[in-house]
Image: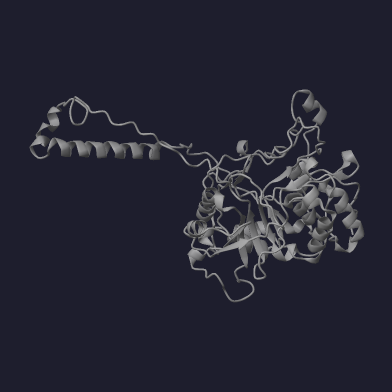
Amino acid sequence: MPDLSFGSMGSRSAPYTPIRSVSSSSKWSFRSSSPSSNSSDSTTFWRTPPKVSKLSIWGYKPFHVPEVEHIHQYLSPRQIAIILVFAFATLIILIPLSTSNPLPENRHIPEFEPIRAEIPLSTKKLPDPIKWLKENSNDRYAITNGNLPLLPGIGSRRPRAALISLVRNSELVGMTQSIKQLEFRWNRKYQYPWVFFNDEPFTEEFKAATRNLTSAKCYYEVVPKEHWELPDWIDVHYFCDIDYDIFRFMRDNKLKYGFNMNILDDARSFPSLWSRTRAFAIAHPHLIHPEADLTWLLDPQTGGEYNNCQFFSNFEIGSLNFWRGEANEKYFDWLDKAGGFYYERFGDAPVHTLSVAMFLPKSEVWFFRDVGYQHDINHHCPPHREAQCSCQPTSIDENFYKLVPLESPQSKPLDTCIRQFLGGKWLSKKEGWTMEGEKAYGGDGYHGYEILGDEINQG
């Protein structure tokens, strides 16, 4: 087993307990947090009562064009006015279509390139997710392309998977917004079922409204309040078209966990999580994966304490076989008996992050850089996908310390969380650059990388 350097602990958690199971028949989950009913999408229009013109029925004085004077012989003034209004409206519609977003003819638009974390050399042959994406995008397995939901044979069988959302009845407006976006961008082509969790029975209004937005099956489940307290969080947005079957991609490449944001969190939320996780690893060394890599979660500045980096689990895709496995079950029970879910704030984000780091090799974890997503102040938009996304591309480091402001006294790691996870070339610094030097000139100390990760300005 690799040296895990388990020192003293400090850690944090998200606002609710991890999912322990969905159904015995499902193997994958695509998780999205509940959107708030305080959606910012609604707009109100105020209409001013029309004023009666004293000039004419159309509001303008009549005028004459000699060349077309003979038209009056065949059309009434009202018919002529209707034709002119229609022509003017058509002109308004056509002008933006022909002039919006003009691009130079010779401009080179780079292609989006997936990013994979650096992994140790292995003697065993590993799947190639990037090759899979090149061969299976363009909605190859979409049901709308004639693929049946269930196909015989192991190789082509559709993955057993579901879209999971935690939501209240009062959050229907925000939930319908998220369903519309995810269905339009992806699931209308693949029709994976939706599973909604609530702390009380769903209303018939909620069921009818959500079912009306998808042709996929919908399931409505109630989680007992003693097991779960739902977070009162914000809106969720999906910005990009996804042109491949995400669940098939995960299964075919033996991937167990996927994320698209890796950020720093407030350590005050879970002061004892790391010490209890370290104690668990010492007591159960046989459960730690032999290729586990926790180095990216340990801070050398603090003697190997947890650096409080976490996968932002408001968007995550995970194998339910993994979450139901012996290691995760025992780790959850260990933390549960310690009382951290109740006396502190052991939440799904840091617990899932530590679980993935301890029980999976990095080769089974995937960074979904191509999925545009926003939850509250954290948002992620991929580069070079302007034609598929309705968002402005963000830097790879965009969300690093949004939850822990720079002025916070909390110790921050030497590198951003996503770069520590990716490793290799993503950690290389410019020659002569120092963090202290950048901070002396008013910088935050995280702009010395050779690869900026700001693909907006590259290519």
On the image, the x and y values in percent for residue 439 come to: 78, 27
Q: Residue at x 61, y 71 (%)?
A: 157
- Residue 418 in which image quadrant: top right
- Residue 49 in which image quadrant: top left
The residue furthest left is 73
- The front one of 235 and 320 is 235
Residue 305 lies, with reference to residue 179, above or below; the image says above
Where's the N terminus, which quadrant? bottom right
- The front one of 34 and 62 is 34
Residue 190 lies, with reference to residue 168, above or below; the image says below
The residue furthest bottom is 152
Residue 265 lies, with reference to residue 127, above or below; the image says above
On the image, the x and y values in percent for residue 62 come to: 16, 26
Mark yes or no: residue 70 visible.
Answer: yes
Question: Would you say 285 lies left or right of 226 here?
Answer: right
Where's the C terminus, which quadrant? top right
The count of marks equals 0
Question: Would you say 317 lies left or right of 90 here?
Answer: right
The residue furthest top is 441
Q: Residue at x 79, y 47 (%)?
A: 344
Question: Would you say 349 lies left or right of 72 here?
Answer: right
On the image, the x and y values in percent for residue 164 come to: 62, 58
On the image, the x and y values in percent for residue 350 come to: 76, 49
Q: Residue at x 79, y 63 (%)?
A: 329
Question: Would you say 377 lies left or right of 42 here?
Answer: right
Q: Residue at x 66, y 48 (%)?
A: 231
Mark yes or no: residue 382 visible.
Answer: no
**Coloration mode:** one colour
